[in-house]
Image (cartoon, rainbow, N blue to C red):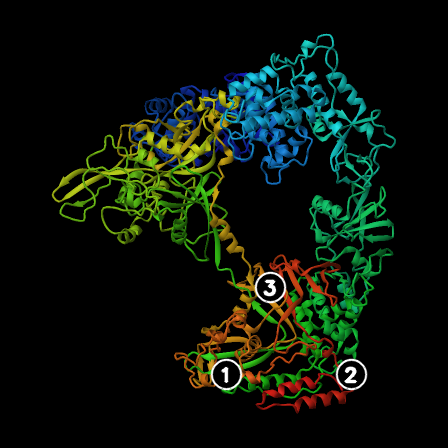
Amino acid sequence: MGAKDSKPQVISYEEAAKRVNNVELKRLKDTFGKYSTPNGLLQQSIFLSEIIGDTVPSNLADLIYTAWGGTAKGITFKDLLSGLVLLTRGTQDEKCRFIFSLYAKDINSVVTKDNVVNYTTKYSDGWNLENISSLFDEAEAVNYSKFREWLITNPCSTSLTQWLLSDPCPITLSNDLETPTFYQTLSGVTHLDEQEIIDLEKKYWQLKNLSSNGKFDIELFLSFASAPISSNSDEDVSKFSIARGLFSAFDENCDGHLDFKEIVCGISAACRGPLVERIKFCFKIFDVDRDGVFSYSEVTQLIESLKRLAVEQFPENSSDADSLEITDLIANEMESVDLESFLMWAVKRNALEHLLDMLHQLCHVVLGLRPASRTEEGKLIQNWLRREVKRGYRIGEFWYLISSIWWKQWSDYVAPNQDDPSKNPPSNAPLRNNPSDSGSDVGTVVRPRAIDNTCLVATSTVKATVLTGEGGRLRRELEKGKDYEVVPEAIWKALSAWYGGSPALPRQAVQFTESGPVELELYPLLLRLLRHSSTTNDNGPAWNGQSWNSIVGGYGAAALAGGYGYFPSATQQTPRRYLAYVAAFSQLATVSQTYEYLCGRLRLKFDDVRLWLMKDDHCLVLLEDENATLASLSCRDNDQLLIEVRNKDLTWPEEMVSLSGQSGDKYRQALPSEKGATGLNNLGNTCFMNASLQCVSNTQALTQYFTSSMHLLELNRDNPLGMKGNIAKDYGDLIRDIWKGKSRTIAPLRLRWTIGKYAPRFNGYQQHDAQELLAFLLDGLHEDLNRVHDKPYVELSDSEGRPDVVVAQEAWENHLLRNRSIVVELFHGQLKSKVTCGVCQRESVRFDPFNYLSLPLPLESYVHVEVVVLRLDGSVPVKYGLRLPMDATYLLLKERLASLCQISPDHLLFAEVSGAMIKTFPGLNNKVRPTSGLALFAYQVLSSTEVIQFLPVNGGNIGAPDSGAKEANRNNNKIGHHSNNQIPKVIDKGGDTNATTTSSEVRRPVGICMNVMSTVFCRKNGTSPGQESLPQRSTNAIQQPVTNGGTNDERNGDRSSLASTSSGSGGLGSPVSLTSNNSSTQELNGSLGMGASFLVVYHRKMIRQDLYFVSPHKTRPSLFGLPLLVPLAWRTDVVSSSGDERNRMLVLQTTSQDLYRCVWTLVSRLVSPSPPTDSGTLPNHAHDCDDSLGYEFPFTLKVVQANGIHCGICPWTKFCKGCPLAPTPDPLPNGSETNSSYIEGVLNYCIAVDWEPTALHLRYQTSLEKVFDEDPSVAKALHQQTEPVSLEQCLQAFTREEQLSGDEKYYCPKCATHQPATKKLQIWRLPPILIVHLKRFQFVNHRWIKSHKAVQFPHNNLDFTEFLAAIPSETLVRHRQMASSSMPPNGVAESSKDESNDISPKHSISSSVPYSNGHPPNIREVITGNESTRKRLESTSLITHPVHDEDLIDFHQHRLLPGYNKLDITYSLYAAVCHSGIMGGGHYISYAKNPNGKWFYYNDSTCKESSANQIEGQTAYMLFFERDGIDMKAYLPKLREPSTSSAESANSESTSGKVAVAVSGLEEEEGKKCCIM
């Protein structure tokens, strides 16, 4: 057994070939060819899956593969056939010889006992040691005859022998059982054959793929059905139309969209059925309310629709329809018309002739049904074409050209036979006779071949891919009627489907002038599309049609090596332009439409593409006007259009070539529309620099400073902290070029090189942080323009309890002693930092300058979870949405979900579902995994605390309360033995008054919210005394579990002891997986509580295989739909009684019939109803013929393993796919009963619902499987999850008090040691220009991440009062209160005096309650409130130095225009930098407002007019605000002459202006300009 040497087969190939017939041999060869490799071998993996199957143990399967002649490379067909014949049709002697050869070298040798035992142990999963020992009673070695005699006597000694010697063999070569396919089923119940149904399916999917939402809904249906039926394209959607009624007639299940079965059955009833069936279908079109009768209004709609249809579509035969009257069918509004009366009226008046003809055309031409005869085909096409030609062209429609040669052949072919017209009756024959169309065409006319339009197309000499579907360029001087015919799109698609052919020649109907006619554009513009290909030395062109064109090196290497603006050819490769595509566009197509089409066709981002029109070889015009048409741009045939795509480093290839000076091309771009509307070339991932520069460039005061060349007079080249004036000079040169307004784009080469020189971290071609670049730029500009040439030494001093006003003024003056520049005046503000010792409460206050605020984004601390709840009553599942904390467990999720779905938490079980299988039951203590990729479902089940309270707490099966019992079961699970579960014992102390169970007590659920379960699980007939029925559900509140013993709290406390068996929890430990094929199914299901309170049920169907090797693989089980959980009911019975103790056993109450009924309750919503017996709803022909639901249940329940594929009872040697359960009233055995041995142990496995093929194909509605009702909580939770944060929240997080502990402890001078403390930041002085940096890049859990959280920010009237320090904030609040009221300031001053007398927050401070946490209330509330709302801040500064209303100080010292109050401080947004994409990559863009008030969008070299509303909060990274009313000119220095002595004089003046305590000294700063006087 397991011989390593190659042995001859027991049956030769020649002998094996004689034992199979020709059909079987051909099938086996075809199957082998399907799976074999090119060298004619079948690999071992295919052998195991397609022949042996995955039920056979892997080691045994490998043994058989080797014994049949398989090698590492594979197995030949001859060896495979020999082995298959031996397995399926070999004689007993041949099989014995094969088994003997596994142990022995050859037939003449002997086998030893050790050899048999060793190999049997290794390769067999079950054996009988006693039987094997009997073989060697007489000797330790036996020959073949002795072995054969023993083997025939003991065929079940091993699992292998049991399989091979079983009679009959479970595996055969052929399987005569035929499972009908989907097409066969539909063909059997409709008037269509299989091929027609297959063709219809192809057309169905073609139409469905045109849907925007992926559904065949009424919107898609009307798009192709309305035009043929009604000529009014602007029909009111609220009114009835034949097209809408037709959709309703097709939509049998009224779910709002059509599946393929409904389309097929509807077509069959409308076109191929007998006259009565066709009239019934028409009845459904006008039966709007589907009540089976016509009301007066419905009859009115019927008559009006028929008249309108006749006039619009059949004007030559509309006289009969004009005679139709409502009174012919119904007398008054009180009457109704039934189906029988309608049939008589329709036949008598021939009233539906036009409607049936239109349905006939629609089903064939649009829906894809092939005509039954050539004459019928001709009438269909010609009638459709006649109607469309009469209607005329409509702008935007496509008509197709067909060669006149082919059209004439087709016309002759479909012409009716004049000699014998009865052979080809018209499709719209009189309804009274309805002669059948046999389709037998008589005559010698040959059927045309495929449509050939090549004679209409000129030969193309261009070798390039065609991007558009115009089919080719037409030859000139073609004449309609002589050379070609034009047909509508529907006719072309129908003819090409029936005959095939090419090329398709669609031409669009256009109107070149407003007063001109609508005509077909036969000759659209044919443009040649060029792309770039960079030539390299190694690998040739870098662009391969899919990847980016990367140009790395170039300007950067040259600039850093020896200057800027110089590009040696050795470093910069000139991209070669080559002809990549050709495409045809309408002359009326706009530039925007051209961009959109090319980006979609080539899968390019819109912002990464530019189009250049090449007028000649060296003149390129950038297409920027999106509304311009190609005709207005003077585009002609064969013009060249260059598609320029950004390089990988975000540079533009043409810009790089232009900057290098190697190209002789002339680039024509329009001048900027406004000064400053100039883009900046990307020089290799320099979008971070370009975006920042554009925002700073639109800072008016700073830009005016540089455009006036004032910076040249203030350059500080001696500053050791500066860049010798290079940054300021190069930046000034760039700003002057931008604001000249003479260039559309500018390359910031000099500034880029200078930045890289002094900050090497910005070198290279990697993406960098725009905020870091901005900080470096502002610092560099400040140091290069610093008016302080000799910086004095300034020593910082602590606050030491001094007033904040004094300390802040001192710190600011110290800052100005060393730093004076226009950058300081515009961008620098002051922050207050207060640290409070947590032990001694000592406060340390510092004031530091800042030039931007870095605001943290609140980290997302919640997860969004969607759960679908499946109830036991079979209702439509409901999806719920929840927002949970980041570390939430499934226990919390269950509690939150229970309150939403009104189901007790004990009745919910979570399951993660993938496809059609339950993957895991997550444990309640596990964290919720919203990104696991699995759908989360919550099943309503019976709580284990209600169904069975005495399950073993160790998580084992019933009857396995301890490890010893488990081991016993494991040893008994061998061949020929089913696992017999032991009877669990329940000890009941007779004298215990708290006993909860009596003899024969039924452990039933309480409070199940389903009446049907009362009938399924709680039968009163045959119950023992003391049994009680299921209580009714309360409709007012959630029914909580109630048992006879213990309170709810006590039972909840005991729930942990049912960790692995509680169906309500799914286990409190690790999640249980059902996906392991190697795990014992019994152990898996036992750990989940199967056999305790529920069974897992899978939907299953059989897929027929035309090519297969052996019978088990002719039909393969396939799982589909949503898995179910079916509850079970138990009771406990007394087994024996001894003394005070009574032993009890569990008895299952659920019968197999109950199981069927419960499954039917859960799945009935997925099955369309049976045909009614009355004249209510009218089914179509297919449903009339379907009797699958004539039985009690349209499915069979089978016992399967956890994978849902293999039988859960039979050993693998049977190759069983599941033993069926009959719907009998006998209880299901729980493993200890033997009255139904063939389902013994069923509770340790799952159940498969095997659907009857007819019911599955016709009744089962696949579209309803994933249809869930959506609870409002889904939208609410999703809104909460995606709700943006406000800028105010970010500022609150910035100014929020933080704790300093651990390594961040504060060194307290008073305590003389490090102590825990609190730190708080607040704004003391606001700069005129405030830059807000949103910290999207954060270091979390030892890695950097980017937050994509959207941030809402105001564009105007931004008020920072709430985030100022106490004294500046209180100053602004007092000013606004005084401005909004007439209260004299003396009263306020008096209250301030009162407040200072008592600083304890525990006491009332005057009449004002201090603000909490140092923040004032909302400013709007303060301003609009009365005197009582004027509250003081709870601040030490305010307590010791209150603000007096009569002496309000401006702490910000901004220079304002006349008319603006210095204490009315609001800001407006004027620029923003946005970052899209991931961290370490992505792309920066910017928005900025010019001095004229217009917003512009800057994307490197692209600059377009925009608006502030287009700034996305999700990508905003830096926001630039300026104070309202700022006087820009006041910040410009009044220069007289540049001299160092003047600068020193200015510095000395600033030194002499110190103010000790008087705050009024701040106002003197307004007279001391930061300039050289």
* Label number found at residue 1387: 1
Q: Dot 3 surroundings within 10 Å: few (below 14), some, or many (20 or more)?
A: some
* Label number found at residue 463: none
Q: Which residue is mark 3?
A: 1353
Near-viewer residue (452 or 823)? 823
Asked if residue 1256 is positioned above or below residue 1008 in the image, the reply reads: above
Say which of marks 3 and 2 sits in front: 3
- Callout 3, which amino acid? Phe
Say which of marks 1 and 2 sits in front: 1
Q: Is residue 602 left or right of residue 526?
A: left
Displayed quadrant of residue 505: top right
Marked residue nearer the N-terminal end (3 or 2): 3
Q: Which quadrant of the rendered structure holds the C terminus? A: bottom right
| Distance in Å between CA atoms under marks 3 and 1 | 37 Å
Near-viewer residue (1141 or 402)? 402
Asked if residue 274 is positioned above or below residue 805 in the image, the reply reads: above
Marked residue nearer the N-terminal end (3 or 1): 3
Marked residue nearer the N-terminal end (1 or 2): 1
- Callout 2, which amino acid? Leu
In terms of secondary structure, where does tag 2 sit? loop
Using the rendered image of the protein, determine whether residue 1335 is visible from the camera's viewpoint: yes
Say which of marks 3 and 1 sits in front: 1
* Label number found at residue 1535: 2
Q: Which quadrant of the rendered structure holds the N terminus? A: top left
Displayed quadrant of residue 885: bottom left
| Distance in Å between CA atoms under marks 1 and 2 | 48 Å
Q: Dot 2 surroundings within 10 Å: few (below 14), some, or many (20 or more)?
A: few
In percent of width and height, residue 1327 lies at: 64, 76
Q: Dot 1 surroundings within 10 Å: few (below 14), some, or many (20 or more)?
A: few
Using the rendered image of the protein, determine whether residue 76 is visible from the camera's viewpoint: no
In percent of width and height, residue 1052 lies at: 30, 52
